[in-house]
Image: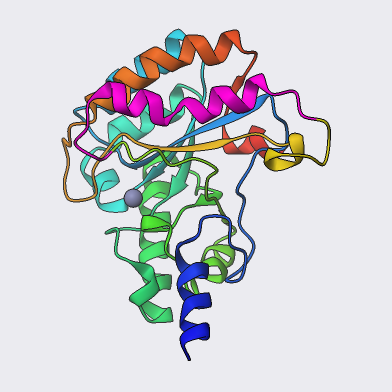
Amino acid sequence: MIATAGVAAYGAAYPRSQIFGPTICRTNSPKKLALTFDDGPNPAITPNLLDLMGRYEAKATFFLIGRFVRECPDLVKETVARGHSLGNHTYTHPNLAWLAPARIAEELCVCQETIADVVGTAPKWFRPPYGFRNPWVVPAAAALDCQTVMWTLIPGDWREKPAEWLIERMNPIAVHARKKLPPGTGYGGGLLGDILCLHDGGHRGLNADRTRTLAALEHWLPRWRDLGLEFVTMDEAVR
Ligand SMILES: [Zn+2]
C-alpha cells in the first residue's frame, strides 16, 4: 500500500515521470531553450513581457488559463501575432490529480474551445496545473490532440523572494549551456536542451505581480543569447 502510494505521488508530481503517460520534458537540442509561461494572460505583466521578448527576438510558449483568456482576448491575439505559441493550462486551474475523468476532460475541453474561439486555432500543447497528473490527465490531453509538456527547471518565480534570488535559481540554464558534454553523459545526455517553466500570471486572479520574473529575464536573456542559446516555441523545440 505504502509503496503504491509512493509511486503514485511520484508519478503525480515529479516533472519527468512518465508513469501516467508520455510527456515532453526537454527540447531536442542543447542549443534550444524553450521558455514557457504559465497562468496568463495577465494584463499587468504579459504586455511588458511581450515587449521584452521582442527586444531579443525570443519566442516562447504561453500556457493559458481559459477563464483569463475569456477576460483578455485581445492580449491573447497579440501574443499570437508576435509569433508565440499557446498552450492549454485548463479552464479554472484545479489540481487535476483529485478530479474524476469527466471533470478532467471538461476542464481541458472548455479551455481548448475558449482559446480556439479567440485565435481561430486550438493549442497543440497542454500543461497540467501544478504539474499534477493521474492516469486520466495525459490521455485527456491526447484526446484533444495536445501533447503534455513538463519542464527541466521550475525556479519558483511565484515565491515572494527578491529578483536576485530568482536570478540565482535560474543559473542552471547557463551552467548547462556552458557544458560541452559528450553524448550519453551528464545532464540530459548532453544532447538535449532545457524547458524553463516561469509564470506571467497567477492562477488566483488577474493582475498578479510578476515583476521579478521580468527582472530575472532582463538579466538572463542577453546572457543566454551570448552563450549561443536560441529561444524557441514548443513547436520548434521538438522539430
Ligand atoms: Zn499554473
Question: Which residue extends farthest bottom?
Answer: 1
Location of residue 195 by image quarter? top right
| Whether residue 198 is situated above or below residue 113 in the rendered picture | above
Percent from the top left, x then y, of residue 63? 41, 44
**Chief SS of the magenta region:** helix
Residue span colored magenta: 158-181
Give residue 27's position: percent from left, percent from top. 66, 38
Say if residue 135 shows up in the picture: no
Q: Nearer the viewer, residue 4 or 58?
A: 4
- Judged left or right of residue 162, residue 168 is right
- For image coordinates 23% across by 24% down, the residue present is 211
Residue drawn at point x = 44 percent, y = 16 percent: 220
Residue drawn at the location 45% of the way across and 24% of the way down: 81
Tell me the quadrant of the picture where the C terminus can be found: top right
Residue 70, position in %: x, y? 25, 47
Magenta residue check for 104: no
* 116 vs 44: above or below: below
Q: Is residue 176 magenta?
A: yes
Left or right side of 125 for 164: left
- Residue 20's spot in the image, x, y percent? 57, 71
Task: Give left or right: position of 137 versus 165.
Answer: right
Q: Which of these two is toward me, 150 or 126?
A: 150
Kindly indicate the quadrant of the structure image that contains residue 30. top right
